[in-house]
Image (cartoon, rainbow, N blue to C red):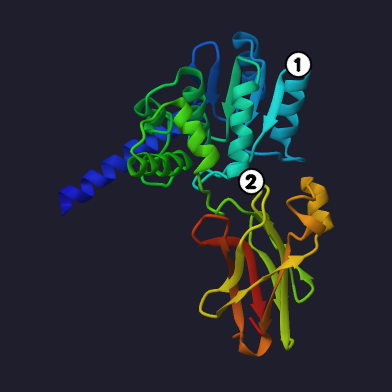
């Protein structure tokens, strides 16, 4: 037992030192010579130097748009000043990538001028996932080479559910089940037609409960609605649709663990959503992408309850999806 504990401590120490090293030195590496590079978030000075020395024509930021954040404002201005195309896609380091963001990233990787730089905050998890896809597009590399892009070599800690591991594990399972062999075309076709993200490929938002808008009390925290005096009925409103294929979802239920499940009415007209996403009238007649689920207030217990959605889209099994919403009832 002591040997095992000591071994784990040594491994943890080595991993920690490795990750710290990459953070300290910008985690800058070549993915494909003279075409694709990867890094952590770079300082102004370092970014300008790399733009000049590598003659960058594109920067792909995997942290997402962050209006008002100093790093984002400065990076965009540097790109503009140096006539470098700038893309922003929001990915999460330890979660399956959104299917719509993944589609947009692949389109950018296929069309953006080279050389290009991929980066997130630490240049490890999100950058590793994107670098693997870029390497497949550029070189049609074997799966073993793609997987190195999200390994300890670049500061990705093992057993943490890194986004690259999650994405490519699903891909490898599909290869085994379908009897297919990996290549560039197979990977890209799988992402387009078979990949399922953590939301079941649905785009959705929960707007209100009992007419009160869900709001976050702190940045990155849960969006909360507080109801002290329970009404007879609590109406929870939102919208959802299969954005990848621009189709209605088949079924949706609102779930509160240890409470109950309520099937939603999917026939609510939401012209605001249709306008934002430019949804066509053929697939979404009368903009019916909204939903409402009604809970009996007398059956809900006091306390705070995280809200989940059980979503089924065309041709898929139902999928229980976590959300960023929490309903707090009574004196909590």
Image coords of residue 245 (percent x, y): 64, 46
* Quadrant occupied by the N terminus: bottom left
At x 65%, y 10%, the residue is: 52
Residue to which mark 2 is pinned: 245
Q: Closest to the observer: 164 or 286?
A: 286
Q: How many marks?
A: 2
Q: Are marks 2 and 1 in contact (CB under 8 Å)?
A: no
> Is residue 292 visible in this depiction of the protein?
yes
Quarter of the image for residue 177 reads: top left
Crowd around label 2: few <14 · some 14–19 · many ≥20 (10 Å) = some
Q: Earlier in the sequence, mark 2 or mark 1?
A: 1
Residue to which mark 1 is pinned: 83
At x 76%, y 47%, the residue is: 277
Disc 2/disc 1 C-alpha distance (Å): 34 Å
Q: Is label 2 in a helix, a strand or a loop? A: loop
At x 53%, y 41%, the residue is: 193
């Amino acid at each position: 037992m002591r040997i095992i504990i000591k071994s784990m401590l040594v491994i943890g120490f080595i991993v920690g030192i490795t990750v710290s090293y990459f953070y300290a030195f910008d985690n800058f590496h070549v993915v494909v010579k003279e075409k694709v590079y990867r890094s952590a978030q770079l300082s102004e000075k370092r970014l300008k130097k790399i733009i000049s020395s590598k003659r960058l024509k594109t920067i792909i930021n995997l942290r997402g748009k962050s209006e008002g954040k100093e790093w984002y404002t400065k990076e965009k201005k540097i790109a503009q000043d140096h006539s470098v195309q700038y893309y922003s896609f929001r990915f999460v380091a330890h979660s399956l990538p959104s299917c719509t963001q993944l589609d947009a990233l692949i389109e950018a990787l296929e069309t953006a001028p080279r050389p290009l730089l991929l980066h997130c905050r630490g240049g490890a998890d999100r950058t590793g996932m994107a670098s693997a896809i870029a390497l497949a597009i550029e070189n049609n590399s074997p799966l073993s080479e793609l997987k190195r892009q999200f390994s300890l070599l670049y500061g990705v800690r093992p057993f943490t559910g890194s986004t690259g591991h999650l994405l490519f594990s699903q891909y490898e399972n599909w290869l085994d089940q379908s009897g297919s062999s990996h290549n560039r075309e197979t990977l890209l076709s799988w992402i387009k037609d078979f990949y399922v993200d953590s939301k079941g490929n649905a785009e959705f938002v929960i707007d209100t409960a009992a007419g009160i808008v869900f709001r976050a009390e702190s940045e990155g925290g849960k969006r909360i609605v507080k109801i002290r005096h329970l009404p007879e009925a609590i109406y929870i409103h939102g919208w959802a649709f299969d954005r990848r294929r621009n189709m209605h979802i088949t079924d949706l239920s609102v779930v509160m663990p240890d409470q109950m499940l309520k099937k939603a009415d999917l026939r609510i007209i939401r012209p605001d959503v249709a306008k934002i996403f430019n949804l066509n009238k053929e697939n979404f007649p009368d903009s019916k992408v909204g939903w409402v689920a009604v809970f009996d207030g007398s059956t809900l217990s006091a306390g705070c309850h995280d809200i989940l959605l059980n979503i089924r889209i065309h041709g898929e099994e139902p999928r229980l999806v976590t959300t960023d919403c929490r309903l707090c009832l009574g004196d909590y």
